[in-house]
Image (cartoon, rainbow, N blue to C red):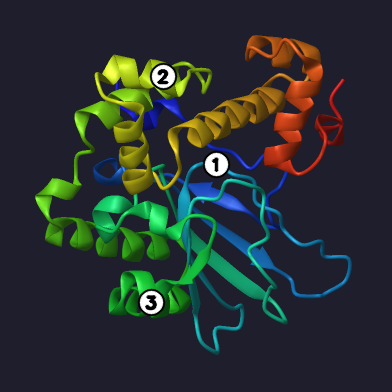
Amino acid sequence: MESYLMFEPTQGARTPDHYAEYKPCPALKAYVSCYWSSRADGTGLCEPAVTVVPDGCTDLIFEWEAEGGGDVSIRYCGAFELPFSPGPKREGASETFAVRFFPGGAYPFIGVPLGEFKNALFRGTDVWGKAAAELGEQLRLAAGTAERIVHVETALLRLLAAADSGRFEAPPALQEAMVRIFAARGTVSVQQLAQSGNISARQLQRLFDGRIGLGPKTFCGIVRFQNILRDAERHPKLSWQEIAGAYGYCDQAHFIRDFKRFYGELPSSLMMS
């Protein structure tokens, strides 16, 4: 089974105003989790800072003034280990359109170890070059979401066609590890992953640092957290004790500590029973 079919990242309730997600075309499903858009009214009144929780993904983000003038801000967001704020918003109303790459999905388009972008935001043109600036203008001038998706997918497919063929497929040991992590919903050890792939823990670390941008232990923790968050969304009648038990937590304090690490707040902030 393809690993991208086994993982559906979520931000839970922590999504900006007027947020929507769109699925990629079949040719890009192995690389792109979704495209997303949001719009900020820019009133400045009671607008809390957006906090993004770790999901193992990386994002290429385009933002511009809602009226269509000014420059397009382009940022590449690496994989984060902890919750973070993407920074101050533009003054006034603004629109955002972004590509959320599946864990490791950006590597074929960049060809640079994703660990170099960990826990940081970069100027999109520094990572993607002139192609990012050209795409940003196309998105700003587009008539709507459907046209923006066409522009993004045309650009991504062009980059994919020009990429070295060695970038497309992750090494078999990494592919197997990803499938095992997603199948176990993050509840698997690095030692188990290394043994199943017949490689050392150090080799596995190098594969994850280069292709995913996070170490395997951290990535497993994020996948487990993401599945917990998704279960909380889908099954609001479950108690936190039931959810914690389903993910191997024997100690409630350990569960709360892990949840707060990735979410930034206690589980009770989600208003569950």
Determine the CA span between mark 3 and mark 1: 24 Å
* Residue matched to label 2: 191
Tell me residue 101's x, y (percent): 41, 49
Q: What residue type is labelled 2?
A: Gln
Q: What element carries label 3?
A: helix
Q: Which residue occupies the foreground of this view, 37 or 107? A: 107
Tell me residue 85's x, y (percent): 68, 60
Tag in front: 3 or 2: 2
Q: What residue type is labelled 1?
A: Asp
Quarter containing the N terminus: top left
Q: Give left or right: position of 13 versus 272.
A: left
Q: Which mark is residue 55?
A: 1
Quarter containing the C terminus: top right
Q: Which mark is residue 125?
A: 3
Q: Give left or right: position of 97 versus 178.
A: right
Q: Are marks 3 and 2 in contact (CB under 8 Å)?
A: no
Determine the CA span between mark 1 and mark 2: 22 Å
Tell me residue 83's x, y (percent): 67, 49
Q: Residue 201 carries which label?
A: none
The number of callouts visible is: 3
